[in-house]
Structures are given as C-alpha cells and as structure tokens.
Amino acid sequence: MAQPEKVILYTRSEIARRVKDLADQISRDYAGSDLLLIGVLKGAFMFMADLARAMSIPCQTDFIRAASYGAGSESSGTIVITKDVDAEIQGRDILIIEDIVDTGLTLRHIVDTLKLRKPNSIRVCAFLDKRGRRKIPFEADYVGFSMEDGFVVGYGLDFNEQDRHWPDVYVIPNPV
Ligand code: IMP
Ligand code: MG
C-alpha cells in the first residue's frame, strides 16, 4: 500500500535549538530545587532524553504511561494510567514531559492524579502544542512548538507505532 505523502515540519537542527532554549529556561527556573522529570511514555522518550542532557541542573527521571480508550487516533476521554511513577512525589518539584498536547485530556488526568500525592509544585513541558484541538482548557507551562492542527510523526511521535525513531518531525496530510 502507498504511504501517505509526508511533509517536514521541524528539522532536527530547529528541534535541537528549541530544546536547548527550553533546557536553559528550565535550568534557571528550577535552580536549587528537588526536580523530578516524569516522561509520558512512549512519545516523550526522545524529547526527554535530549532535554535532560541539555539541562545544567541536577534532576531525577521517571516515567508514567497513560492509555486513552477510543477509536483510532481520537481520544475518548477515558484515560487510564497503565504504568505508574515509581518515585516519591510528595514535597517534590514535578515537571511532566510530554510529546504533544492535543485534546488535553491525557495531561489533565495525569496532572490531577499526581496532584493528589501532594507535590511541592507540578508543571508540564510539552514538545508540541496542538492548540486548535482542545476538548478541555489546558495550558502547558513550557512548549517547544505550537501548531493549530494536523497529524505529526517523528521525534517520539508515532502513527500506529511507526516512525517514532525519525529525528525530524513530519506532518502526515491524511492519516487513515
Ligand atoms: P490528548 O489526550 O488528546 O491531549 O492526547 C495526547 C496523546 O495523543 C499524545 O500523548 C500522543 O500520544 C497522541 N497524539 C496526539 N496528537 C498526535 C499526533 O499528531 N501525532 C502522534 N500522536 C499524537
Ligand atoms: Mg503520548
């Protein structure tokens, strides 16, 4: 079957520059704090690896995984945490690292769940923010790039579990 045509959206060098800016900003904002980065699997693995390596302050790293039950690429609104964080949350400064904010439902659920464990602070850093697609209001505290709509792959983001390993980000015009 023919692959849908893909168009490059963010190149690896644009991504590297933006990730470095974010890492500098986060390093300033969290200087002297007890920072725990929590990556949302699987999509955030590449962004988190680059971001953490570009930071100049100490931090710990952990992961969480959430599944959204719904048809195809549409989020149903029922979010379930399928792999929980191992680390202690109480009293710590939590920065959730996510690949993309789309409807906002996944991050809303993760933030609300982790807040119950009484962190000192909790913020979100998203590589991409698809602003035109929200089902609920949700603002990430740090955003790599903002876009309106469109389905993107690469740099951790997948289409049916393919293409996560690509170093650049592409738009797939008509994902099916
Ligand atoms: P939300 O709950 O609708 O905000 O969905 C967030 C999740 O949907 C992300 O963590 C991604 O895994 C996935 N997602 C949303 N948009 C895209 C996209 O354009 N490409 C790949 N995955 C996406
Ligand atoms: Mg994801």
Image: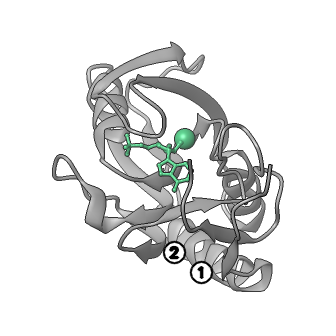
Q: Is residue 75 left or right of residue 174?
A: left
Seen at 78% across and 77% down, the residue is: 12
Q: Is residue 14 left or right of residue 171?
A: right
In the image, what residue type sits under mark 2? Answer: Gln
| Callout 2 secondary element | helix
Determine which residue is flagged by label 2. Answer: 25
- Residue 39 or 161: which is nearer the viewer? 161
Residue 76 screen position, x and y as percent: 31, 28
Question: Looking at mark 2, is its residue's CB closer than 8 Å to ligand 1?
Answer: no
Q: Is residue 122 left or right of residue 20?
A: left
Give the class, few, some or many, for how many residues have Cα within 10 Å of label 2's Cα (few <14, many ≥20). few
Residue 94 screen position, x and y as percent: 45, 41
Above or below, 122 against 84 in this view is below
Numbered circle sitting on residue 81:
none
Seen at 56% across and 54% down, the residue is: 175
| Callout 1 secondary element | helix
Numbered circle sitting on residue 21:
1
Above or below, 125 against 74 in this view is below
Seen at 75% across and 61% down, the residue is: 50
Quarter holding residue 149? bottom left
Residue sitting farthest toward the front: 1
Assess whether mark 2 and mark 1 are in contact (beta carbons under 8 angstroms): yes
Residue 114 screen position, x and y as percent: 35, 26
